[in-house]
Amino acid sequence: MLNEENAKVAGRVIAKAWADEGFKVRLLADPAAVLAAEGVDVPAGLRLSVVENTEASYTLVLPARPTDLSDEELDGASGGWCWYCELSL
C-alpha cells in the first residue's frame, strides 16, 4: 500500500492532522475512510490502524518480513527505512 505517491499523501495527511484537531480525531477514528478521501488506495478488507505517539507513549511498528530477501540481504538492510524520518529532513 505504501508506494511513493501514497507516501507523499501520507506526509500531507500527517501535516493536516497536526494542524487540524478535527481531522486528527477523524483520522484516528476511521483511518481507512479518511485516507481514501485523501487519495490513498486502501485495499478492501485491509485492517488499518493509526496511533498517535505522545511524550508518554511511543509505538514501534514491526513491518512484515519481506519474502523476497535472503537472510544475508535482510542483515544488510537491518538499518531500515523510515518514511517519517525522511519527511522530517
Image (cartoon, rainbow, N blue to C red):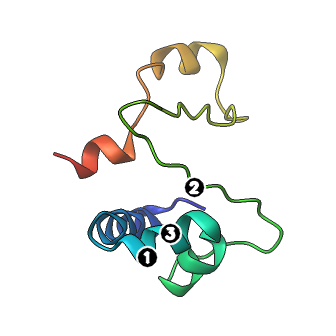
Residue 52 image offset from top left, x and y in percent: 47, 48
Front residue of 42 and 76: 42
Give the CA distance from mark 2 to mark 3: 10 Å
Name of the residue lying farthest toward the left: 89
Question: Which residue is pictured at 26% across the width and 70% down the height?
Answer: 19
Q: Identify the mark nearer the N-term, 2 or 3.
A: 3
Return the mark for residue 25: 3
Three-letter code for the amino acid on which mark 2 is drawn: Val
Three-letter code for the amino acid on which mark 1 is drawn: Phe
Front residue of 88 and 81: 88
Three-letter code for the amino acid on which mark 3 is drawn: Val
Label 1: element kind = helix
Question: Which residue is pictured at 76% across the width and 59% down the height?
Answer: 47
Q: Identify the mark nearer the N-term, 1 or 2.
A: 1
Residue that label 1 marks = 23
Question: Which residue is pictured at 77% across the width and 63% down the height?
Answer: 46
Residue 39 image offset from top left, x and y in percent: 50, 83
Front residue of 46 and 58: 58
Q: Residue 14, relative to residue 82: is it above or below? A: below
Q: Is residue 47 left or right of residue 5?
A: right
Give the CA distance from mark 1 to mark 2: 13 Å
Residue that label 2 marks = 50
Give the CA distance from mark 3 to mark 1: 5 Å
Q: Nearer the viewer, mark 1 or mark 2?
A: 1
Q: Are marks 2 and 3 in contact (CB under 8 Å)?
A: no
